[in-house]
Amino acid sequence: MLFATVGQWKVFLAMMVAGLLAGGVYDLLAALRHLLRAGPLISLAADLAFGLLSALLLGGMLTFACYGEARFFPFLGAGAGMLLYALGPHRLFCTLCRQIVRKIRQALRHIAKFRLIKVIFR
């Protein structure tokens, strides 16, 4: 039984990385949805894109790590990676996105005060 379990840590680690990346994809799409002030159709499109991208990412990593052999522990590793992302980089990413959006809005408000812009977009 030793030979069957000796490489499982590599598969678990690879799937944790895939879970972290899936969490990053979710946050990028959530930031895009927030930036665009998305309605139900754009939210649906973002959710479908997340489902497709995460399925491709997790399936690709599963194929790369253990040749597509679906067992419980790779999915447990992906869940652990997503949980690790939610506890760590998620908050940092959200704070960073808020600051970037705030700076973009300030710049656009500043540009909107120019007389030429007021004439063009009357």
Image: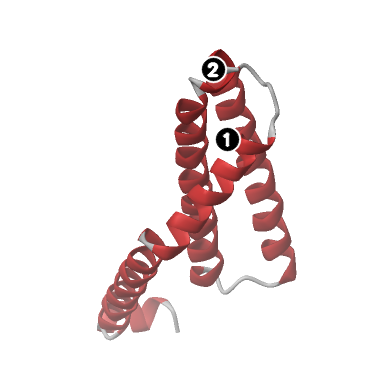
- x%, y% of residue 104? 31, 72
At mark 2, the secondary structure is helix
Residue type, label 1: Leu
The residue shown at (36%, 67%) is: 97
Taking the view exactly as shown, the residue that stands out farthest to the front is 1
Residue type, label 2: Leu
Left or right of 60? Residue 35 is left
The residue shown at (50%, 57%) is: 83
Toward which corner of the image does residue 59 lie, by quadrant? top right
Q: Which mark is residue 57?
A: 1
Q: Which residue is mark 2?
A: 2
Label 1, residues with CA under 10 Å away: few <14, some 14-19, many ≥20: some
Above or below 104: residue 70: above
Taking the view exactly as shown, the residue that stands out farthest to the top is 3
Question: Which part of the image, by quadrant, shows the C terminus?
Answer: bottom left
Q: Nearer the viewer, residue 27 or 70?
A: 70
Q: First in sequence, mark 1 or 2: give its number.
A: 2
